[in-house]
Image (cartoon, rainbow, N blue to C red):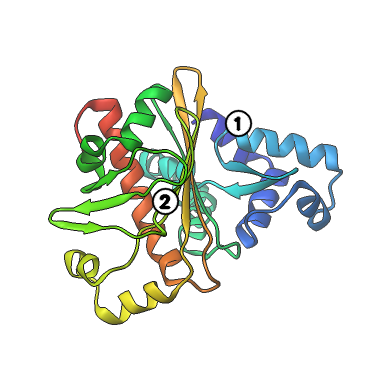
Amino acid sequence: MDEVFKALADPSRRRLLDSLNGRDGQTLRELCAGLSMARQSVSKHLAVLESAGLVTTVRRGREKLHYLNAVPINAIADRWISRFDRERALALTDLKNALEHTPMSDPAYVYTIHIKTTPERLWQALTDPAFTRRYWGMTLESDWRPGSPVIWRQDDVAIASPEQTVLEADPGRRLSYTWHTFTPEWAEANGIDEQTRATLAAERRSKVTFEIEPVGEAVRLTVIHDGFDSGSTLRTMIEQGWPEVVSGLKTLLETGEPL
């Protein structure tokens, strides 16, 4: 927590967070253009924010995109906010609310969390049906080779489609696949009305990528869900879904018991 408080204490770093809150997924050049700071200064501040877990970066070709990560802010609010008086806590509360309720202009969804486990164990948790059933409530069945199908199975409902495939698979490092198909059976099993299901089915198929990186005795997991249409209904829905799924994954790996 000390790194988070230190990072938030600097007004220049708070300005960078404000900038990303207004438009997520910016490059270093874009951040510099929007703030009256030298490139070197912005780079140093971003390094502090990234070290504190407040900013997550994703490589896109030769560019590095910067995204807000709300996890440390949520942890501060949940664990420490009651120890401060209202006036001192106001800035953190406002930032937490902004991160949770302000839609990101960039349609990509990026979520980062640290888990006390190994890359091999995390890979197993992402790909083994017995694992996914315990924290996700469903199984993902595949041989996890690029181009292979991915079958989603929830209770007695199986979702399969030629477009549900593995895109990338580098065990212990990176996994990517296309999102599932919104069938009537899936909608019924999850209590989704037909109008919403039809809206989801009409949208462009999205994809999810898991990036796994060892950090000391833990592993940093970055979930990138992208490929959405502008104004996507699914994009709004997964904002609530992914934190719950990933929190369940973390709890299972660290305690042996699901949430």
Using the image, determine if residue 118 lies above or below residue 108. Answer: above
Where residue 65 appears, as percent x and y from the top left, is 67, 48
Q: Is residue 120 visible?
A: yes
The answer to whether residue 250 is visible is: no
Outermost residue toward the left?
156
Relative to 225, is 199 on the left or the right?
left
Q: Residue at x 36, y 49 (%)?
A: 149
Question: What is the secondary structure assignment of the residue under circle 1?
Answer: helix
Point out residue 194 in the picture as x, y percentages from the top left corner: 26, 79
Tag 2, which secondary structure?
loop
- The image quarter containing residue 251 is top left
Name which residue type carries label 1.
Ser
Q: Disc 2 residue type? A: Thr
Q: Where is residue 25 in the image (x, y as percent from the top left)?
A: 64, 54
The answer to whether residue 44 is above or below residue 187 is above
**Measuring 29% from the left and 26% from the top, which residue is drawn there?**
254
**Residue situated in front as seen by the camera: 25 or 47:** 25
Q: In this view, does 199 lie above or below 136?
A: below
Looking at the image, residue 113 sits to the left or right of residue 23; the answer is: left
Q: Residue 165 carries which label?
A: 2
Which mark's residue is nearer the viewer, 1 or 2? 2
Locate residue 126: give its quadrant: top left
In the visual, does 147 lie left or right of 181? right
Answer with mark 1 or mark 2, whichever residue precedes in sequence.
Answer: 1
Q: In this view, does 231 lie to the left or right of 25?
A: left
State which quarter of the image contains the C terminus.
top left
Residue at image location 42% in from the left, 76% down from the top: 202
Q: Mark 1 points at which residue?
A: 51
